[in-house]
Amino acid sequence: MGIRSEIAEALPEIFTDMGEDATYTPVLGDPLELKIFIDFDVQFEPGDLTAQTWQTGTQIEILLEDVEAEPSRGATFLYDETTYTVLKVIQNDGFTVKMAVK
């Protein structure tokens, strides 16, 4: 078994055991309950290579297999009585998706 198979097998248990409960609502479709990792005060890289100011914000990570499609701008996550709106996808490695949210 290769490393990608090991990761695919381990991630669902990690999210189940350590993730936070949230409700995901895609732009089109029905809400669903899932587990997330949420990080506050994340320093996002500047969008322009000449920029020197880093922006801080909130990041949410989900299991890609928990959703039908990669979340798009405008999708929301309800966590701890706060709604977070997806601004952009930062990373999709085929296992998880990390998003900048506001």
Image (spheres, rainbow, N blue to C red):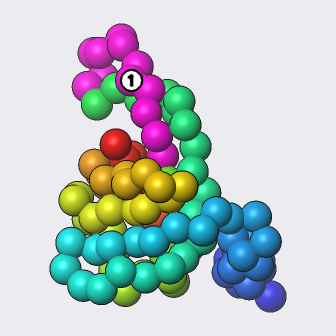
11 relative to 64 in the view: left or right: right
Q: In the image, what residue type sits under mark 1?
A: Gln
Locate the N terminus by quadrant. bottom right
**95 or 80: nearer the viewer:** 80
Q: Residue 89 at x, y = what percent?
A: 35, 55
For the magenta stretch, what is the residue range? 48-59
91 relative to 27 in the view: left or right: right
Going 58% across and 43% down the picture, which residue do you hit? 39
**12 or 94: nearer the viewer:** 12
Q: Is residue 44 above or below residue 11?
A: above
Residue topped by disc 1: 55
Q: Is residue 8 above or below residue 44?
A: below
* Res. 11 image quadrant: bottom right
Going 43% across and 62% down the picture, which residue do you hit? 78
Question: Can the viewer see residue 2?
Answer: no
Q: Is residue 17 above or below residue 102?
A: below
Q: Looking at the image, which residue sits at the far front? A: 81
- How many numbered discs sit on the rendered protein? 1
Q: Residue 43 at x, y = what percent?
A: 49, 28
Q: Secondary structure at mark 1?
A: strand
